[in-house]
Image (cartoon, coloured by chain):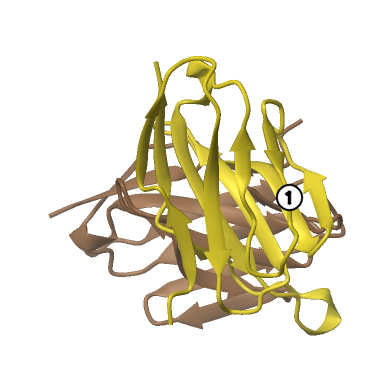
Chain colours: A brown, B yellow
């Protein structure tokens, strides 16, 4: 059983639309959750971190965490072509390791 | 501030050769990680360390070894390179804050390894 799963892509949205990215995890004791963006050939870069249930907003990005459902999501409002990248969900497990999902490739079409 | 530094950036190995991927961080982070990323895939955890002298296996440890003799350094060793180890390798670090919450990972720029 995979420990971190993301909705399979690729995901394509028109410019200005909302992109919704989802992630589920298996370790109920997980406490730290992250969304990273990765452009082709580059290292992942942090978009959002979230530690408590509910929503966390930062500019056009909103992360949502539901520990009871073991679910994390990322919403990107007013999507721009520059948002086209692979988005990686990461979860810190109870045994101290940090696991990643397979990633969702997002394309924002002008 | 250098952050996480990985060397080399690129390397081509022949089957059966060995090499060490170097990783050092200057942020005094206690946690360090090695990941591999195959084309079009997410990051797979190879090994991680929660402090000097402590290492643990991740999802895909076979064919690799690590050591953590200092807080700063976390080298990854490939003993008998195989084509299946062709990948991009990322080293990352983080710290453990209050209430067991991890800081985000700081990544190095990656090492692109080809085994032929």
Q: Residue at x 79, y 63 (%)?
A: B50
Drawn side of residue B61 relative to residue A40, left or right: right
Q: Residue at x 52, y 25 (%)?
A: B85
Vertical placement of B82 versus B106: above or below?
Answer: above
- Residue A7 visible somewhere in the drawing: no
Vertical placement of B25 versus A88: above or below?
Answer: below
Q: Nearer the viewer, residue B31 or A62?
A: B31
Position of residue B80 measured from the top left corner of the image (x, y, whole percent) = 60, 21
Drawn side of residue A37 relative to residue B63, left or right: left
Q: Which residue is drawn at 50% across and 49% down?
A: B90
Secondary structure beneath dot 1 equals loop
The extreme left residue here reads A110
- Residue B83 visible somewhere in the drawing: yes
Q: Residue at x 70, y 38 (%)?
A: B65
| Label 1 environment density (alpha carbons within 10 Å; few <14, some 14–19, many ≥20) | some
Drawn side of residue B116 relative to residue A92, left or right: left
Position of residue B16 measured from the top left corner of the image (x, y, whole percent) = 54, 16
Q: Number of numbered discs present? A: 1
- Pick the quarter of the image with the N terminus of chain B: bottom left
Write down the residue under mark 1: B67
**Image quadrant where residue B92 sits:** bottom right
Q: Nearer the viewer, residue B115 or A87?
A: B115
> Callout 1: residue from which chain?
B
Position of residue A54 measured from the top left corner of the image (x, y, whole percent) = 67, 75
Vertical placement of A44 versus A26: above or below?
Answer: below
Q: Nearer the viewer, residue A33 or B91?
A: B91
Q: Nearer the viewer, residue B22 or A50?
A: B22
């Amino acid at each position: 059983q995979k420990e971190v799963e993301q909705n399979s892509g690729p995901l394509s949205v028109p410019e200005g639309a909302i992109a919704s990215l989802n992630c589920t995890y298996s370790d109920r004791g997980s406490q730290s959750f992250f969304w990273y963006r990765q452009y082709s050939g580059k290292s992942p870069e942090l978009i959002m971190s979230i530690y408590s249930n509910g929503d966390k907003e930062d500019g056009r990005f909103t992360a949502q965490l539901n520990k009871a459902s073991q679910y994390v999501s990322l919403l990107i409002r007013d999507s721009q072509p520059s948002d086209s990248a692979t988005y990686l969900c990461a979860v810190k497990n109870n045994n101290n390791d940090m696991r990643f999902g397979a990633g969702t490739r997002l394309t924002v079409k002008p | 501030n250098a952050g996480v530094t990985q060397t080399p950036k690129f390397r081509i190995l022949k089957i059966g050769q060995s090499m060490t991927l170097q990783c050092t961080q200057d942020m005094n982070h206690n946690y360090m990680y090695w990941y591999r990323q195959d084309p079009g895939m997410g990051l797979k955890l190879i090994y991680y360390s929660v402090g000097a002298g402590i290492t643990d296996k991740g999802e895909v440890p076979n064919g690799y070894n690590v050591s953590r003799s200092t807080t700063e350094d976390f080298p990854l060793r490939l003993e008998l390179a195989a084509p299946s180890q062709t990948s991009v390798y990322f080293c990352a670090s983080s710290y453990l804050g209050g209430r067991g919450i991890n800081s985000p990972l700081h990544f190095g720029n990656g090492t692109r390894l080809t085994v032929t």
